[in-house]
Amino acid sequence: MSNNNDTSDIKKAAEQADSQQIEQNLENKKQVDAPVKLSEAEQTSFIDDDLRTDK
């Protein structure tokens, strides 16, 4: 399959994009849920403190 095919999904999506709908969606600024608080057991560091060399 060729990436420069005129009937590509990206080209179809670009042609069918409704600029007024996009603008309206951007203006709505929907509120997102606040992050869930993690329990102490869930708050694990990515790197073991003993292995850190940046201290």
Image (spheres, rainbow, N blue to C red):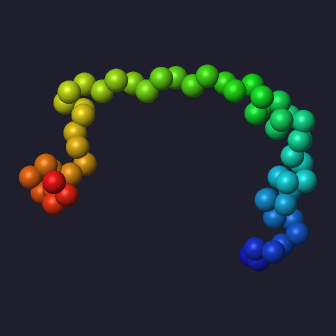
**Which image quadrant is residue 28 in?**
top right
Instruction: Tell which residue pokes out farthest to the left in this image.
Output: 50
**In front of the other: 46 or 7:** 46
Residue 11 image offset from top left, x and y in percent: 84, 60
Residue located at (52% from left, 23% from top): 33
Residue 50 image offset from top left, x and y in percent: 9, 52
Residue located at (16% from left, 60% from top): 53
Q: With 5 as the anchor, is 47 left or right in this view?
A: left
**Which image quadrant is residue 26 in?**
top right
Residue located at (30% from left, 27% from top): 38
Q: With 40 as the anchor, is 34 left or right in this view?
A: right
Number of marks: 0
Q: With 15 as the anchor, is 38 left or right in this view?
A: left
- Above or below residue 14? Residue 33 is above
Quadrant in which the C terminus is drawn: bottom left
Residue located at (84% from left, 72% from top): 5
Instruction: Tell which residue pokes out farthest to the front in this image.
Output: 55
Quadrant in which the N terminus is drawn: bottom right
Residue 34 image offset from top left, x and y in percent: 48, 23
Residue 51 image offset from top left, x and y in percent: 12, 57
- Above or below residue 15? Residue 23 is above
**Which image quadrant is residue 9 in?**
bottom right
